[in-house]
Amino acid sequence: MPTRVSVVEDILSANDRLAVANRDRLDAAGIFAINLMASPGAGKTSLITRTVEALLPEFSMAAVDGDIATTIDADRIAALGVPTVQINTGGACHLDAVMLQEALSRLHLEGLELLIVENVGNLVCPASFDLGVHRNVLIASVPEGDDKPYKYPVMYRGVDVVLLNKIDVLDAFDFDIDYFRRGVEVLNPGLAFLPLSCKTGEGVAEWLAWLRGEIA
Amino acid sequence: MPTRVSVVEDILSANDRLAVANRDRLDAAGIFAINLMASPGAGKTSLITRTVEALLPEFSMAAVDGDIATTIDADRIAALGVPTVQINTGGACHLDAVMLQEALSRLHLEGLELLIVENVGNLVCPASFDLGVHRNVLIASVPEGDDKPYKYPVMYRGVDVVLLNKIDVLDAFDFDIDYFRRGVEVLNPGLAFLPLSCKTGEGVAEWLAWLRGEIA
């Protein structure tokens, strides 16, 4: 029934079709991939640094780093000894499946086990573009304020785990964790929630345990 | 020469044409308008609160508040006794000139002197959409990190002043003000730079002085 197949394909956007192809390619290579999303400066690169330092002996890893401009983040990650592909979006406010497809073709996928994708710092646009990874990770941070789930619901709805970074400065900010969590719970019931500090290392072990569990 | 006029008009996008119309409308009413842009949680609403509290006796003011969802910010501003129009973008990552046009038609413009527009929390997309206001204000904040001018150059290039908020927590973060300023200076030479804390009030007087000077 070719007509029916054609209809099914049409309801997927061009981006979603490529995302499926990316996932197939990752699966075929035995690679588990995560997509880190956050506001600018919430701690995406710091989390990658912590993760690579802890898991590099365990897993063969690579990174894909999306930025409007510069290679500041990619340089930090590559310095840890991880193959890193920089995507400069040239102004675009998010990564998409085409960009990840291009990045995958620049990596040696054979033998890789974990791929970490760092999206553009933006709490809005990245949520609308499936990349074809296995888990979407949102990094919130204390200084941003406890009302962000309420104000950026699309992002909070579409992720598989929320990390709350910079808990080392909780005392310096008026941040009500219960209010924050209630907002998350309404949008994404039962979502895994991991408070941590990439600076002090507090809570990082719980994140690594969560990630190991998902990879397994 | 109607053909020539037509060409000149065509190089302006639909948004830019509406922005010009907004500016004309504001000018005709004798209103000075500013557009506040920032990452999520950098302190846009806190700056509006400080500004309204200080300048309300001096100027007749109104606010337009852009958010993906909720009226949290608009409620905070309206509680100060300022007419406030909430724009819920319904997922859109920035305000545009159409949205401001619509908001203007819901305000009583007669007698207004200062209009403060709060854009969606986003360091990328709002920079590309002229609203037709008189000054574009960027609020950076210490916890975001000192590398933001380098990584989000379009935003830093397009504004008339940069505020660095949350300087009360400078000691808790590795933030190199000189590195930050060098990044700004390369993109936007001579740009006014105002460090402040909306929490403690430090530096707010300098912001108010700058704003008064621009209105005059």
Image (tube, coloured by chain):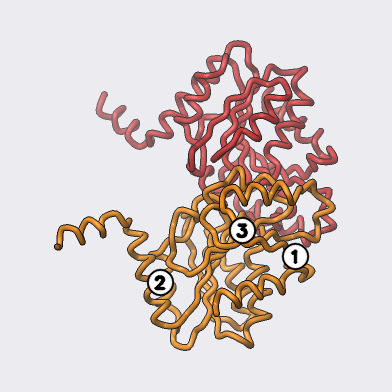
Chain colours: A red, B orange
* Residue A150 marker: 3
User: Could you tell me the amino acid type at mark 3?
Assistant: Tyr
Q: Which residue lies furthest to the top in this view?
A: A110
User: Could you tell me the amino acid type at mark 2?
Assistant: Arg
User: Could you tell me the amino acid type at mark 1?
Assistant: Ser
Q: Position of B98 compared to B202: left or right?
A: left
- Horizontal and vertical percent position of residue A115: 62, 24
* Residue B197 marker: 1
Instruction: Identify the chain of the residue marked 2, using the numbered disc in the image.
Output: B
Quarter in which the N terminus of chain B is drawn: bottom left
* Residue B155 marker: none
**At 72% across and 49% down in the image, what residue appears?**
A141
Separation of disc 1 and disc 3 at Cα?
24 Å
Instruction: Identify the chain of the residue marked 3, using the numbered disc in the image.
Output: A
Q: Do labels 2 and 3 share a chain?
A: no
Separation of disc 2 and disc 3 at Cα?
32 Å
- Horizontal and vertical percent position of residue B150: 61, 43
